[in-house]
Image (tube, rainbow, N blue to C red):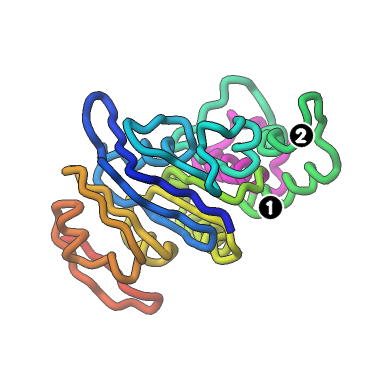
């Protein structure tokens, strides 16, 4: 089972220490939610886990292999990152963009085959974009563009999925459907780590949470244990009430 491990990791950005000496093990079968106020380093932590941002101190390993020793193509076959903002420097169509997720699995001069097309078609169906394969990407709405980015990530078929605000721009129906899908993938053995702003989404879909405080303090553990109104009040500097709902606890700020 896949394992992503941080040992004594310190992360700094713009001369500020976001967190220090963090020991954390993330395993397949877990769905993690990263929570915290703006500017505490949620996106930076995801970039660190993806090997795009070097730690100030400490080591990161994927299945006991240091991330720095893995070739980018080999790493992309095992780990996928959904960025918070999507950029399309070149005009393309929806299916062409989804197929970019297959590139780590192709040879240097490889061309997508029937299997790749089937995977991309299934991914587009998963995000409710069937019938839009030939639409230009720059004609899509913000929510449709986000769903396309998720489809591209699903095409990558990586065991580790790092998601920066995956519900960004999505309406409620697509938020629920796609977060439920990532929860299902985690339960099947993949590792999902997602930065969220809504603690209720974390409570509903995540098995584990990581709380990043502005002070640099970090708390992590099982969601059912760690998510309380008291801890969330400290995290966000907002008072919360806890309500028992039909699918679990709800946290209402006031």
Q: Given the current orientation, which residue lies at the most extreme right position?
A: 114
- Along the line of sight, which residue is nearer the eye, 203 or 187? 187
Q: Which residue is depicted at the point 59% across and 62% down? A: 189
Q: Is residue 144 visible?
A: no
For label 1, the crowd category at 10 Å Cα-Cα, with few meaning under 14, some 14 to 19 and many 20 or more, is some
**Residue 90 location, quadrant:** top right
Where is residue 28? Give x, y as percent. Answer: 54, 58
Vertical comparison of 93 with 186: above or below: above
Horizontal placement of 157 versus 63: left or right? Answer: right
Horizontal placement of 246 versus 160: left or right? Answer: left
Per the rendering, the mark at residue 106 is 2
Q: Which type of secondary structure does the marked residue at label 2 adopt?
A: loop
- Along the line of sight, which residue is nearer the eye, 150 or 79? 79
Q: Which type of secondary structure does the marked residue at label 1 adopt?
A: helix
Q: Main secondary structure of the magenta part?
A: helix
Q: Which residue is depicted at the point 36% across and 33% down? A: 55
Instruction: Report the span colored magenta.
Output: 129-155
Q: Which residue is depicted at the point 65% across and 54% down? A: 126
Vertical comparison of 123 with 38: above or below: below
Q: Give the position of the C terminus as an image quadrant.
A: bottom left
Horizontal placement of 8 versus 102: left or right? Answer: left
Q: Is residue 151 a member of the stretch shown in magenta?
A: yes
Vertical comparison of 13 with 231: above or below: above
Where is residue 11? Give x, y as percent. Answer: 31, 35
Q: Earlier in the sequence, mark 1 or mark 2?
A: 2
Q: Is residue 243 a member of the stretch shown in magenta?
A: no
CA distance separating discs 1 and 2? 22 Å
- Along the line of sight, which residue is nearer the eye, 230 or 9? 9
Q: Which residue is depicted at the point 52% across and 41% down? A: 146
- Along the line of sight, which residue is nearer the eye, 150 or 81? 81
Per the rendering, the mark at residue 125 is 1
């Amino acid at each position: 089972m896949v394992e992503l491990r941080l040992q004594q990791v310190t992360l700094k950005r713009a001369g500020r220490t976001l967190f220090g000496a963090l020991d954390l093990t993330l395993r397949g079968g877990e769905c993690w939610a990263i929570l915290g106020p703006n500017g505490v380093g949620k996106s930076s932590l995801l970039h660190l886990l993806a090997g795009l941002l070097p730690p100030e101190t400490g080591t990161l390993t994927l299945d006991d292999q240091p991330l720095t020793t893995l070739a980018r193509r080999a790493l992309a076959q095992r780990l996928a990152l959904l960025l918070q903002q999507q950029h399309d420097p070149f005009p393309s169509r929806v299916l062409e963009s989804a197929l970019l997720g297959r590139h780590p699995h192709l040879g240097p001069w490889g061309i997508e085959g029937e299997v790749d097309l089937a995977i991309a078609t299934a991914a587009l169906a998963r995000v409710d974009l069937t019938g839009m394969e030939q639409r230009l990407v720059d004609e899509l709405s913000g929510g449709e563009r986000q769903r396309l980015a998720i489809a591209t990530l699903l095409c990558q078929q990586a065991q580790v999925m790092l998601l920066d605000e995956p519900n960004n721009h999505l309406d409620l129906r697509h938020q629920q459907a796609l977060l439920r899908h990532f929860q299902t993938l985690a339960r099947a053995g993949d590792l999902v780590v997602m930065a969220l702003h809504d603690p209720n989404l974390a409570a509903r879909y995540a098995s584990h949470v990581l709380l990043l405080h502005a002070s640099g303090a970090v708390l992590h553990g099982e969601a059912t244990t760690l998510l309380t109104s008291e801890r969330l009040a400290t995290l966000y500097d907002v008072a919360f009430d806890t309500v028992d709902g039909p699918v679990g606890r709800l946290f209402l700020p006031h």
